[in-house]
Image: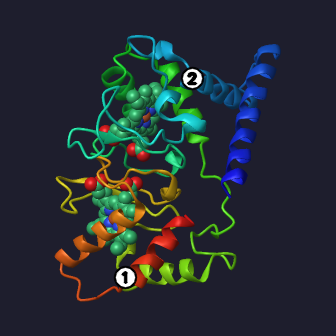
Amino acid sequence: MRGHRLSTLVGIGAIVLTLSTSQADTPTPSHPTSQEADSLVARGYALFNDPALSGDGQWSCASCHPSFGHTDNKTYVGVEVVADGDPTGRSTPTLWGVGTRKTFSWAGTAPSLEANIKSIIVNRMKGPQPSEETLAALVAYVKTLSYPPNPFLHADGTPTDTASAAAKRGYQLFIGKAGCITCHLPPTYDKEGVEDVGSGGTFKIPSLRAVSQTAPYFHDGRYKTLEEAVRAMWEYMQRAGTSETLTDAELRDLVEFLRIL
Ligand code: HEC
Ligand code: HEC
């Protein structure tokens, strides 16, 4: 699975690289074409990897979102790595699927993807105010970062026959008595807006797609494993007054389901 995903990502990289080289040789067309859109994406890819966006010339977007926009699994204040769980730290999200999201940043306060990226360049990377063109190219590029093909999920986010029995049981619990579906909606398993789940404030409802690869968990990276994060969410459901119970085996099935996302 990991190898498969890796080769898919390397494939995406190869396409982007091919675009950027072929664009260099191609004259600019006189009217908007899909080629122009491709060239915007290629410029965005180059900018994404360009440390000149940061004040000290040392940080590119790819420093923290390597492997074509994924996460380096670290928790930051600005560009400083801090201990996971530091209340001022923010865990680096994957950018896979970012084009499907409606709420950006853990606090959920960024009004748009453009505004979010602008604030990252100016406030986190201490770089110069980016031009409209730079922002448009970065937005176009990050929107191409889809979740890798997943043989365990149908397009609507439900498990395929290939998924293990434990994962399928976990899915039934997720949409059933565990109540997770109220906030984490398929196919992306997130929802617009923020919620207070007793973790120290209101935070966006994060997507659970690819969640097995995005540890540490929660806005401040306080949970090292998916098991701990799922237990914490279930404890929240209990505090919130659910009358259901889950056995340890059922909690394990829930985790098995999240692992195939
Ligand atoms: C020093 C590490 C670092 C660098 C460099 C960095 N990011 Fe991030 N990025 C983060 C962290 C940490 C967060 C979460 C911050 C928060 O939500 O408060 C984040 C969040 C995001 C988000 C929001 C995703 C979501 O689902 O809410 C986007 C989009 C993003 N970054 C894109 C970029 C782009 C584009 C660049 C380059 C211009 C960049 N990042 C540079 C660490 C970094
Ligand atoms: C009331 C809405 C709500 C419900 C219901 C809910 N969650 Fe969450 N979930 C959230 C929010 C908000 C966060 C982010 C909390 C934070 O970062 O402090 C989160 C975070 C998570 C994370 C960590 C993801 C990451 O990238 O860090 C996992 C895993 C998770 N939830 C699984 C579940 C499971 C399993 C259930 C059902 C038992 C569930 N959630 C029910 C709102 C909800």
Residue at image position (29%, 39%) is 83
Closest to the observer, 72 or 151: 72
Closest to the observer, 53 or 133: 53
Residue pointed to by mark 1:
248
Q: Quadrant of residue 192?
A: bottom left
Residue pointed to by mark 2:
49
Disc on the earlier residue, 2 or 1: 2
Q: Answer above or below: position of 145 versus 132.
A: below
Q: Secondary structure at mark 2?
A: loop
Q: Compute the Cα span from label 2 to label 1.
A: 44 Å
Task: Say what amino acid the circle numbered 1 marks.
Answer: Asp
Q: Is residue 86 left or right of residue 103?
A: left
**Quadrant showing the C terminus:** bottom right
Q: Is residue 171 left or right of residue 34?
A: left
Give the image location of residue 25, x and y in percent: 82, 14
Q: Residues within 10 Å of mark 2 (few under 14, many from 20)?
A: some
Give the image location of residue 65, x and y in percent: 50, 35
Residue 136, labelled with which disc? none
- Looking at the image, in which quadrant does ligand 1 appear? top left
Q: Residues within 10 Å of mark 1 (few under 14, many from 20)?
A: few
Residue at image position (48%, 84%) is 172
Q: Quadrant of residue 86?
A: top left
Q: Answer above or below: position of 239 versus 222.
A: below
